[in-house]
Amino acid sequence: MLAFRIEAEDDTELAAVRVTYGDQKWVREDIGESPFAGENRFSGLAGDNPEGGRVEFLARDAAGQESRKRVTPDEQAPDLSEFQVAPTRSAGEVSLTLLGEDDVGLESLSLILDGSSQLQQDASGATQASFDTTVDVSDAATEGETNTLTAALEDWNGNTTERDSDTYVRKFDRLTETRLELGANYLLWAGDKFGNCFEEGANPMPSIGQYDELAATRVRSRHIDQMQGYGVTNVMLTFNGTASDRRLLKRFFDSDLTDQIKLRPIYTIKDYRWHPNRSHGNWKDEVVPSDMEFIHNHILDRENAHTYRGRPVVNIWNAAYLAWADKYHEQIMDEWGSYRSFTTDLRDHLRVNDTDPFIVGGIAGGSGYHGFPNDRIVDFIRELDATTTWVAGGAWGEDNSATWDEVLPWVEQDFQGHREFTGEHDMEFIPTVFPGFDDRPNTCWGSDRYTPRSLDGFTSLLELAEEYRTTPMVDIATWNDWTEGSQIEPGSFRGTDYGTAYLEAIKRFQQSS
């Protein structure tokens, strides 16, 4: 196909114009006017270009005087210098960014998905064209999956440049009006445990299927899509400084939706990471600078880092353990001299654009507020900005289990204690809620600890958290810790298919007044 345009003028009037290319001819006679402009196309062209590929233009006036011009048609495909598609915050919709140019002129842009045109845009002969728009692709896209879209940019002469781009297409509209900021504890390594840490017959099954620790980007995108569709507003990313955690965290950022949800690090200090009897080097000079730099550069310095009053939020999951465990306490005292020097060093490393971090200390395990009478824990925790809780391990009896009739009063007492403590020390309190706990089928580190999963119990904890919180933040343990049965990720567990029940409870809570 060859598109052409002819413009001609004469002092009196034009009689005829003609465009010839090989054996094809386009003629307009008895024009009787000046100036004249016309355009058309030659189609069905094949084989070698005739006469060296030249097009002849002829204009004749009423006196029979002729003017001719020969040009070589454009055979260069347009330049598609930029083409990006990305998920928006709405289900079945993508954003399109495109920049193209052609010396002769652009004809049109098409956006194609699975052989179906999703957008047809006229370029009107412009030599440059840019498009920045949103496109509804719900009719052709597989929502909740990565889709391949093709941009086809065509110039006046029918030359076309095509380029593909893959993007996740949302299944859920993002819930925008929410009651609180709900953060879900996200275990990057959770998928590694499906084939390794469950007794035969336990068969935990996420609704999207089991995934490995190096989960494909579409798995991470599906998780974020599900979270935001039901009212989870931020992802709390577990990180304990190991090489594996660094690799998994970097991979998480490959998701198409990573930039669309708030991110918060949970720094977990455990025996296998900071252990005085193992060769991990000096904490002050080696371990802390390395770990804090990674958190700063990969999470806190991002535009979508979770903040409280403008300060980037960082959790230390088992902060109380640092003061309670003799070996950790002694290591901190030997290298920093005091808890204040230690926390000041953390803040210096985590500061973003001269803004101090907001550090949340976790009172994990079974101690809860009941562990605060330990003077060392009090001295350390009050150097932080807030406290948070975990699952109600302290409610478990000698058989390592507790009913919800036992859990709920224990949790309320725990929340009350945190509220009183933080009020006395000019701190904030961020409660944590959970759907249950069950590590009985866990063959790796399970201790037969058990609180039955309960939708009513989970909902009651959300309401208790609303009552005792001092910030807009409430945290959830967990999104996907299947090994301890505290996950709210849709799926089935120990023979019970709970589907999206816990997410539906969150949505009802977030939309209530």
Image (tube, rainbow, N blue to C red):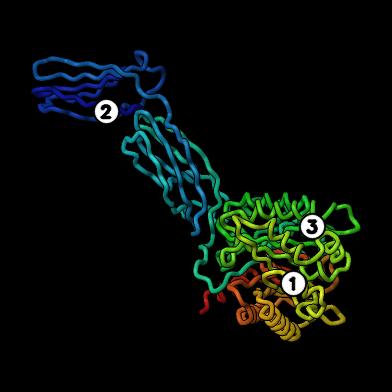
Q: In this view of the protein, which residue sits in the foreground, 89 or 362?
A: 362
The residue that mark 2 highlights is 5
The residue that mark 1 highlights is 381
Q: Earlier in the sequence, mark 2 or mark 1?
A: 2
**Can you name the residue that lies furthest to the top here?**
51
Instruction: Determine contact: label 2, label 1, CB under 8 Å.
Output: no
How far apart are the two marked residues, 2 and 1, measured between alpha carbons? 78 Å
Nearest-to-viewer mark from 1 and 3: 1
Disc 3 residue type?
Gly
* Disc assigned to residue 467: none
Disc 2 residue type?
Arg
Q: In this view, does 281 lie to the left or right of 312?
A: right
How far apart are the two marked residues, 1 and 3, measured between alpha carbons? 38 Å
SS of the residue under disc 2: strand
SS of the residue under disc 1: helix
The residue that mark 3 highlights is 195
Q: Which residue is drawn at 64% across and 55% down?
A: 299
Q: In this view, does 325 lie above or below 398?
A: above
Q: Residue at x 64, y 69 (%)?
A: 499
Q: In this view of the protein, which residue sits in the foreground, 12 or 183?
A: 183
Q: Can residue 227 be seen in this view?
A: no
Q: In this view of the protein, which residue sits in the foreground, 22 or 400?
A: 400
